[in-house]
Image: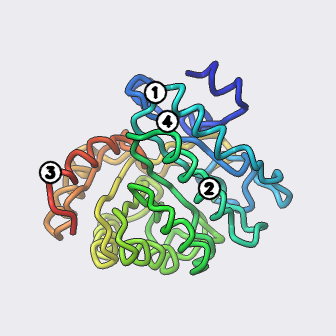
Amino acid sequence: MKAILRKRNLHTVCESARCPNIGECFSKPTATFMILGDVCTRTCGFCSIDKGATPLLVDPHEPMNIAVTAKELGLKHVVVTSVTRDDLLDGGAGQFALTIKAIRDNISRILIEVLTPDFNGDEGALASVFEARPDIFNHNLETVPSLYSIVRPQADYRRSLEVLEKSKKAGLITKSGIMVGLGETPEEVREVLKDLKASGCDAVTIGQYLRPTRGNLEVKEYVEPDVFKEYEEFGKSLGLGHVYSGPFVRSSYNAEKLMEELNGNQVN
Ligand code: SF4
């Protein structure tokens, strides 16, 4: 799989972020492709992706390269994500839409999940992604609102919640996630879960933050497994049907399980 990815100069977050679940996902096979280059215009404290004001030009061949690669690898589930491109007029939304279309046109049975930035809340940008009809629209809140200034300094908690609300109103299966262990309190996590329920979110992931490099935020706490379990139970008690909470849970992990569950259950 890695050889094929290198051949087309494609990047997966699975490798770049040294995800602990990479062996399991690559063997399924599922993968998370990162489009729009590997330089981000934002400076999130938890993220080790290169930062810079002059990211790469948008590659017009990228959507088809991803579709061809996903087909060649026999992927059953593909996640498409990107750095945040505040330098682009549409924030890169058009490239997301083209990538979804290229995958759909080339592979008849595949689950497409997008994990997008907030596009600064731009209605037109969001609409272009919604109209491409991904199977799952995922946008992560990442943390509790009190920690946004250090964890996601250029983001806005309410704006991200609105992105999720709009996705749900567009009729998409909507998903979000947070990391814990960054200094948040359990009460703050419970408040986030309430906000996610109010936004109409269908599925939530909660995982332990791990410091990717010494330049990133320190881990404030390794959260105990029974606390993860308690978050899951609290989320479910609110009516959130699909809450995945555990130390190694990551944003796109187990999306196939989610789809199986959603196909068996009524979505909110
Ligand atoms: S916006 Fe995304 S890619 Fe950019 S620094 Fe933040 S988490 Fe990393």
**Residue type for callout 2:** Leu
Which circle, 4 or 1, is nearer the viewer? 1
**Residue type for callout 1:** Gly
Residue at image coords 41%, 39%: 77
What is the secondary structure assignment of the residue under circle 3?
Answer: helix
In terms of image quarters, where does ligand 1 lie? bottom right
Q: Is residue 266 left or right of residue 187?
A: left
Question: Mark 4 near mark 3, Cβ–Cβ under 8 Å?
Answer: no
Of callouts 1 and 2, the N-terminal one: 1
Label drawn at residue 54: none
- Alpha carbon separation for disc pair 4 and 1: 11 Å
Q: Residue 52 falls in which quadrant of the image?
A: bottom right
Tell me residue 202's x, y (percent). 28, 64
Q: Is residue 132 left or right of residue 110?
A: right
Label 2 belongs to which residue? 98
Residue at image coords 73%, 44%: 61
Of callouts 3 and 2, the N-terminal one: 2
- Alpha carbon separation for disc pair 2 and 4: 18 Å
User: How would you rate the neighbour count of disc 4 (Cα within 10 Å): few for under 14, some for 14-19, many for 20 or more?
Assistant: many
**Residue type for callout 4:** Ala
| Residue 217 in view here | no
Which circle, 2 or 4, is nearer the viewer? 2
Q: Is residue 145 left or right of residue 45?
A: left
**Residue type for callout 3:** Gly
Of callouts 4 and 3, the N-terminal one: 4
Label 4 belongs to which residue? 31
Label 1 belongs to which residue? 74
Which circle, 3 or 2, is nearer the viewer? 2
Q: Quadrant of the N terminus?
A: top right
Of callouts 4 and 1, the N-terminal one: 4
Of callouts 2 and 4, the N-terminal one: 4
Label 3 belongs to which residue? 264
